[in-house]
Image (cartoon, helix red, strand yellow):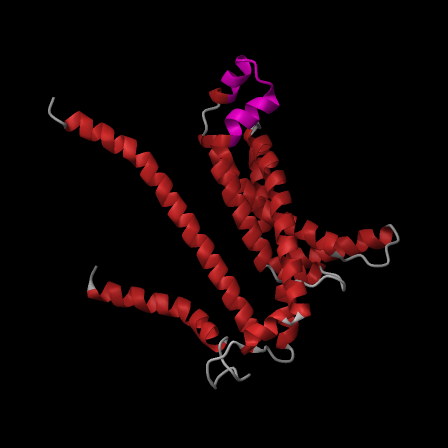
Amino acid sequence: MKPIAKVYTALLFLFLFAPILIMLVFSFNSGNSLSVLDGFSLYWYKELFHDEDTLGALRNTLILALCAALLSTIMGTAAAVGMNKLRSKYMKAAMNTVTNLPMVNPEIITGISLMLMFVFFGRLIGMRTSLNFGTMLIAHVTFCLPYVILQVLPKLRQMDPALPEAAMDLGCTPLRAFAKVELPEIFPGILTGLIMSFTLSLDDFVISYFTSGNGFETLPIRIYNMTKKTVTPKMYALATLIFFVILALLLVTNLSDRSGEDVEATPRKKRRQKKHSPS
């Protein structure tokens, strides 16, 4: 690598990770200043675990993200299977357009339109409070679905269409053929869609802000409400903990993927050595 490329890469990584590094350092600040270090302390971590409102918002966020990820993965996988079996190219084009629309549509428009729809139907059936956990869950599933479909659909198109037909010829029902043959083939796409849905739901603020009710507050909304007054370093402590949890999960995932690649590569290496060894 050329020296200029090394400098450019170093500056790029510095720009990306400098804010996280600053947040991490100030999470251990003994004072409440957001610009001056008064000393090293775990005070704000202790304060975080005594803040019931923040921990409650974190719990709500995790529950919402998990439910949205599971529902959108199940519905998205079913939708991808159905779209893969469409024969009309015009119908396929229409379904692809409908799938891509929520991703290219601005979040603020999606959030406002969903809020208006929930309020309209809520008043139509006489509900006193139209916005609650259910409305946020529906909203999160709505914008997570396309990402699941776009992860599963390519896996279905890469799969040999004769595999499920062969399974049914051998006596499997269509459902059993899907579970035994198709599901293992598309499982990497399903897993990727699940992880993406969980991450998107965990991170969302705009749509959550417009579709949330008074009795359910997520962590992004709580942090936004705190910015109207002041953000204490205990939010830095919480963000630091989340960062290290995600970093640990990424390391475990990468190590497991590498182990799987090594296991797959070992038989091929042995075959090559056997082929080139003198008889």
- Residue 6: quarter of image: bottom left
Residue 163 on image: x %, y %:
48, 21
**Majority secondary structure of the magenta segment?**
helix
Front in this rendered view, residue 131 or 176: 176
How many labels sit on residues? 0
Q: Is residue 2 left or right of residue 141?
A: left
Q: Residue at x 73, y 55 (%)?
A: 133
Q: Is residue 98 left or right of residue 267?
A: right
Q: Quadrant of the N terminus?
A: bottom left
Q: Give the magenta-colored segment's residue range.
A: 164-183
Residue 225 on image: x %, y %:
66, 72
| Figure check: 237 above or below 253 | below
Q: Is residue 48 left or right of residue 166?
A: right
Q: In the current view of this chain or complex, which residue is farthest to the left?
A: 278
Q: Residue at x 53, y 72 (%)?
A: 236
Q: Is residue 177 magenta?
A: yes
Note whether residue 56 is visible.
yes
Q: Is residue 29 magenta?
A: no
| Figure check: 159 above or below 9 | above
Q: Residue at x 59, y 37 (%)?
A: 95
Front in this rendered view, residue 268 or 160: 268
| Figure check: 74 above or below 162 | below
Q: Residue at x 65, y 54 (%)?
A: 63
Residue 47 on image: x %, y %:
60, 75
Residue 161 on image: x %, y %:
48, 23
Front in this rendered view, residue 56 or 191: 56
Note whether residue 207 is visible.
no
